[in-house]
Image (tube, rainbow, N blue to C red):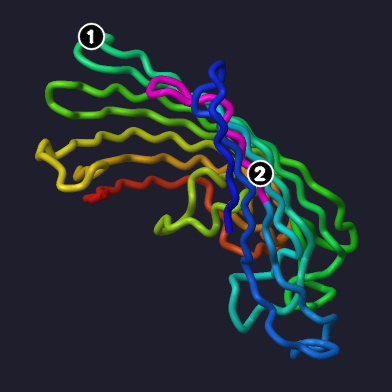
Amino acid sequence: ATLGVAPEIGALPGFAAKLCYGRAFESGYRQGSDAHGSAAMRDSDMLGVSLLAYETPDARVDVQYQRGFNIMDGIPGPTVATNLGDIENIGGSMLRTVRELGPGDLTVFGSGAASASHPNGNRYGGNAAMPGLMCDGPDCANKTGMGLYTGVRYDITKTKTKIGAEYNYGSKDWITFVPAGDDIWTSKLGTRGNVYELYAIQDIGRAPIARDGRVFFRLGWQYYDFKYTGTNSWIGNSKSISGLQANQAQMTVPIRNAYDVYTTFEVRF
């Protein structure tokens, strides 16, 4: 659910603000304790505030804050056993386009964000021997992380070709809500480490049948340089991959680096 307001402010074109609410997990009807014998499950809810401070066809500045309450201990479904605590994020981004720079337009952007976990002491599966929210063992303290994201794209007017490069970095305890994304194997913006990407977009230069219609191909290459374990996972303590020992159990198999080559055909309307 979203409720927004967009007043007309001469000095701040495009200004808008939104209050957003969502439910990530519905615990359903329960009485006393759940099927796993732990304290009764709570619903997992999300509340966010988005502020678009400035937007024109050539520039954009925005800030967003969100908090997830009573985060579940797994992907929503019958195996969810308990709530692990809260996660919050705050971040902002800036974008600027320079028109007619040579045979096309140049766009640059930058974004920064911080995350914080607030564990409640519960453990995965309701088992005291398992990890909790961003933590292992008896010590489940709050963790903070940070992420950076920047990129540049050049749009060639005559051929309708766009060429871009992007870079993002996530710290040891960086966590976002991107596990809900539709990436095939992992969302790059939640990576704990470095990700480098090059891509090209080729628009099909046909007249659209919808006002905002577009059809294009995209070809991209990504290199993942993982520095810490647990990318896109909120369960368990993140550890330096270079310092891992054979007897250190992980919730997921650690990966040091990976390459991803992809192509898409997209229709938007």
The answer to whether residue 217 is seen in the rendering is no
Mark 2 burial class by Cα count in 10 Å: few <14, some 14-19, many 20+: some
Where does the image place residue 57, in percent across and percent down from the top left? 38, 24
The residue located at (73%, 53%) in the rendering is 87
Q: Is 168 inside the magenta-drawn segment?
A: no
Image side of residue 76 versus residue 264, left or right: right
Left or right, residue 192 beside residue 195: right
Label 2 residue SS: strand
Q: Which mark is residue 49?
A: 2
Check residue 9 in the rendering and tell me which mark sits there, or answer none: none
Q: Residue at x 66, y 38 (%)?
A: 171
User: Label 1 sits on what residue type?
Assistant: Gly
Q: Position of residue 205 (x, y in %)?
A: 11, 36
Secondary structure of the magenta portion, mostly? strand
Q: Amino acid at mark 2?
A: Val
Q: Foreground: 19 or 43?
A: 19
SS for callout 1 = loop
- Please give the name of the residue rendered at 58% of the width and 53% of the height, measured from the top-left corner: 2
Quarter where residue 148 is shown: top right
Percent coordinates x, y for residue 255 in the rendering? 53, 52
Q: Quadrant of the N terminus?
A: bottom right
**Residue that extends furthest to the left in the rendered view of this protein:** 206
| Residue on which disc 1 sits | 102
Residue at the farthest top position: 102
Q: Earlier in the sequence, mark 2 or mark 1?
A: 2
Please tell me which residue is depicted at 15% across the width and 43% down the height of the picture: 208
Q: Is residue 190 above or below residue 63?
A: below
The part of the chain drawn in magenta is 48-60
> Residue 251's image quarter?
bottom right
